[in-house]
Each structure stands twice: as C-alpha cells, then as structure tokens.
Amino acid sequence: MSTPAPNPLRFFEAINAYQQTEAIKAALELDLFTAVAESQGAVPAIAERCRAAERGVRILCDFLTIHGFLTKTGERFALTPDARAFLVRTSPAYLGDSIEFLLSSELVDGFRNLADAVRRGGTALSANGTMESQHPVWVKFARVMGPVVAVSAPALAEVADPRAERPVRVLDIAAGHGLFGIALARRNRQAHIVAQDWAPVLEVAREHASKAGVADRFALLPGSAFEVELGSGYDVVLLTNFLHHFDALTCEQLLRRVARALKPGGVAVTLEFVPNDDRVTPAPAARFSATMLATTIAGDAYTFGEYDAMFRNAGFSRNTLHPLPESPQSAIVSSV
Amino acid sequence: MSTPAPNPLRFFEAINAYQQTEAIKAALELDLFTAVAESQGAVPAIAERCRAAERGVRILCDFLTIHGFLTKTGERFALTPDARAFLVRTSPAYLGDSIEFLLSSELVDGFRNLADAVRRGGTALSANGTMESQHPVWVKFARVMGPVVAVSAPALAEVADPRAERPVRVLDIAAGHGLFGIALARRNRQAHIVAQDWAPVLEVAREHASKAGVADRFALLPGSAFEVELGSGYDVVLLTNFLHHFDALTCEQLLRRVARALKPGGVAVTLEFVPNDDRVTPAPAARFSATMLATTIAGDAYTFGEYDAMFRNAGFSRNTLHPLPESPQSAIVSSV
C-alpha cells in the first residue's frame, strides 16, 4: 500500500477560508447575484448594475464560480440553483440579510481570539458572552433570521402538532422572530401561541405574527425564560435553538419549569444541532459546537444521548429524535 | 430528469468559512498539533500540554477533525499525515509561522472590504497596496515563508538549470527570502547568485544563504527591480511570485530589462499561479486572483496565454509552461 505524499494544500485552504466569507459578503453588499440574474451574465453588464469596476467584478465572479455559487461558460456567468434560490434579492427565500446576524461582531469577535476561548474553556467575550441579559444581538437575530428558519419551521410544526385538527396551546420559549410558533398557528387555526422572550425581541415576533395574519392567536410573555411565570396547561412547549447556549445543569433547571408548564400528554419540542455520539458527524451539526465555545460560557452542540439525559433528569420519560429534511438540525419530542 | 431542491448549506458554509481560519490559527497559537503528536491524543493530556481547558480543547479538536486536520477514534485524536508533516512544530516542514504573512493585517485587511475593491477594480488599501515602496510586509514574508517555498524550490531549480554541471550566473529578482536562488546554488556548486530586493528584505536572504552554506556565491543587489542596474550576462533570471502584482504593461517594462540582462541562450524562469484559460481551474491557482484584487492596484493570476503575450511583447520568442509537482504553481521558461 502506498500513501500519497503529505500536501500542504488543505492547510492553505483553511488559512485562506476567510476569503470565502469576505467574497460572499462583498457579493451580497454589491447585490451581485441579483445583477447576474437580471443580466445575460457578461461582466460589463454585471459591473454596470453593481456600479463596480469590470476588473473587480470579473475576479469576484471567478472566485464565486470556483466556490460553487456561479457557473461560467465562455465569458458569461450564471447562477447555480442554490444561488438563484437564496441569494437573489427578489427571491422569496433570499437569505442575504442573515449575514447581519451570522457575521455580527458579537459572533465574529468570539472567533477572533479563539485561542483564548480554548484556554478558558468558554467565550473570551464579556462575562456571559451573547447570553448577557437582553443582549442586543438577539433583536438583530429576530429581525434577519426569518428566511433561514423558513426551511425548517413547517417541518417542525408538523412534528409538534401532527394532526393539526384540535385546539392546542403552545408556549414558544425564547421565541425570537416568533416564526416557529407562527408556523404552528398557520398550520392549525385552533392553535394559540404564547411567545416568550425579552420585550424588545418580542416586538419583532409581534410584527411577524401580524404579517402572517395570526396576531389574534399570538400572545406575548416578556421576560427571562428562567424567571418569568410561564403559565401551565400547554399542549406544546417549543425550545428552538435555546438549550445549546447553556450547560447541562442550567438546561435541566429550565426543563423542570417546562415539565410543570405542560398539561398531561403535552410535549416539549426541541430544535437543535444534534451531532452523532462521535461529535464530528454530520459536519453541519457537529461544527456548531465551536460557535458555542466562541460565544458562550458553557454551551454546546449536545448529542441526543446528552439531551435524553437532561430531559430525564428534569422529569421527562420519553424522548425521540426526528431529523428534519433539508435542515442541518433535528427535532427532539419529549413527554413527561 | 429531477434536480435536487436548492439547499442553503453551501451558503452557510461559505459565510462561516472564516471559522476555519480562526480555528487553525488558534491551534497553531496553542501548539495543539505538537501536543497531539507528543501525547496519546486524549483530551486531558492535550489540554495539559496546551495549558488550556478540556472543554475548549475537546471542541477545537472536534472542529479540526471535521475539517480534515485530525482523526478521532473513540475519545482519542490523532494527526492526519498532512498535519503531522506541516503543523507539528518539530517537523522540518513546519508551516505554522507562515500565518504571520498569510494572515498579516496587510493581506487580511485587503479582503475586509472586498466590496470596495470590486467597486474600484483594485485594492481599497493605501494607494499602492502591498506594492508601496519598501512595504514592511515583505520583510515578514521573507522571514516566514521559507518552509512554504521548500516544496517548490528544488523543482524550480531543476527547471531553471537542468544539467547543473556548468558555471551559471543567476539573477534572482525580488528574491525575498532568497530560497529559490539558494536552491539553485545548492543544486549546482558552480552557480553564482545575485539576489535583488529592497535592502531590509535582503538581510533575510543573506541569513538564509549563510545557513545553507552558499554565502560565498550569493551577492546582494539592493533596490527596486524597476530601477536598479541589473547587470548583464546572466544565464538565468528568476522571477518568482513577482509579476502577479502588476498590470501587463508594467510587467512588460520589467521583462524588457530582464531580456537585456540575459546572455545569449539565457532563460527567464517565472514561478506563478497560472490558471487555465477559463480562469476558474485549477482552483488553487485560479483563486489567487482575488488576493491580487484585494491587495494590489492591478495584479492578477495571469493565464499562460497572457504571460506568453507579455514576454513576446518584451522581446522573448519562446515560452514553455512547466507544472510543478506538489505545488499549486507553475514555472514558465522564456528565451529571447
């Protein structure tokens, strides 16, 4: 058996990976994908629409072709199907605004000194990282991440309320943009949602509920998920992208509150990045743990086994894992 | 024919690509790869050697496994062959110090506002970008990039002086670390090198020549490649990683000086990132054009056809392309 000679290419690719981030950011800022969609894909036409230099556009388009966002035939560029769906501003699934959160200084700065975070075992940002009380990044999150959750919200609503034919009371913890609860309300006209989050964040959720035409079944519960009176008798409690911010004991503390808020037969529905037990597959879920290291004190991408233990410790007796199609995330359905 | 539904995964991967850069940088700063090499690969042992927290080390090692630098078996990590060769500090091929140049603020800042560079059609840094006269980044480059060129320097020397059995006079333009000329001197004991660059950069080249035991055949020619008297009667003129910084007319101006410096039968040997005519393959060469957009006024990753035209316009009659094994770069041999 012969093994190939060691090659430094992978090292250089990783060191220069930040250039991909900057190239996509620049393309969105220039609205280049829209310009490609609305032209025949020749550099002069794209440059005119983007008010940019032809040399700059040509080199950026080549770079985006190399990285899978454009195709190139002769001297003309075209959009890949993914770019057409998600990066053209007029597309209903346009994701471009999400970089205001995904590349916010709060997240990026957490990675800027990752070595310090590794030394400490937690974020090198402020004492509580992005979990500071009422951290403004979450208003930004609520405002721009809607199109990102659009992929998984209907699938999660189906997992949470499969029949969708009876009245259900839903508590949406750390609702943020509110779109998961709203998806339930749209799926089932007998669903009533209580959205909990910090008051400034709930303003965004309220706007979304109004636009979706479900405002009359959408109540607001401002305050901390760990402190506010949650109420009781819920059929469904949603825990979407929240538990990953905390250590297991803190999660269990919250889950005990959730167990008490459910009515008999009710379910907690968790949406999370859930890697396999090896913690390195599948990559899109597993690599999320690094974001939790960089931006929180003790959060993680927990495995299903770890979530199962947390829920059991908090009084739940049955937890099932539901991978969501087209999403790097999974749902966990838990009953007491 | 069915096409797969559009998926936003590639977009998220590119947006978060900067995390790979930060993870490798953190691992090198913590000397984590050396710690893995010198331990059995369990997290507590790595953490102790890195003086870091186990949680931080575990998450970083998982991330590096996902991205191909480590392997994981049970709870133990090990190095991939590439990481063992290039990222362990005690390895003769250790590349870690190269990030002082590759991630220097001069290069990274060029990408930080790539949209502006696209609008202008050239660097948004200072007027001349990294081509400012005597820019200090090139001393840094000379100091840390030696191990990177070690891969291609012997192969380039073989292309430049295949027989290595007769006296040759070599002019190394923009010599930097000097290692390409030094490789020629080591290959052929009858080779004499004249290394041209700015004086502070040549100090580094002189140190390298001494260490390599070729200082007695290594002369210094400080000054600008465009202005200094280059001399004449050279068998070989090396142009390594220099032409890509300039527009074609500027390159031709320099190449005319090179043609005059060669003796009859002499050759200019260029080392460059040379993409195919489509400018998007092969990726490691083609994507270099973005670095030239971000950091220079008018540089590029030129195709062989473009170099061929520049050399012909400058009085050369024959140019041949030589891909270098194990390297993303190619050599071009040009004779008058």
Image: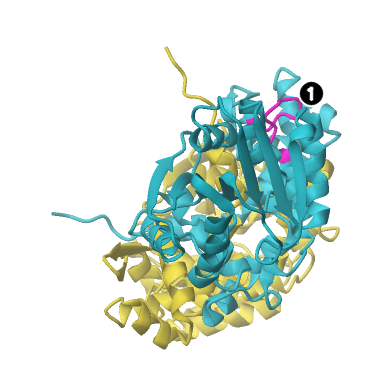
Chain colours: A yellow, B cyan
Q: Splitting the image into 4 quarters, where does residue A220 fall?
A: bottom right
Between A7 and B246, the one lying in front of the other is B246
Task: Answer above or below: position of A137 versus B25.
Answer: below
Q: Quadrant of the N terminus of chain A?
A: top left
Task: Answer above or below: position of B68 versus B196.
Answer: above
Question: Looking at the image, can residue A312 be seen?
Answer: no
Counting from the top left corner in percent of width and height, residue A101 is at 61, 69
Task: Answer above or below: position of B198 versus B63.
Answer: below
Task: Answer above or below: position of A60 versus B52.
Answer: below
Q: Badge 1 is on which residue?
A: B45
Residue under the point 74% across and 48% down: B142
Farthest top residue in view:
A1
Q: Is residue A118 left or right of residue B119?
A: right
Instruction: Find numbered disc 1 in the image and state the secondary structure of the residue it sits on.
Output: helix
Between A90 and B97, the one lying in front of the other is B97
Tag 1: Cα neighbours inside 10 Å, few (<14), some, or many (≥20)?
some
Whether residue A139 is in magenta: the answer is no
Q: Quadrant of the C terminus of chain A?
A: top right
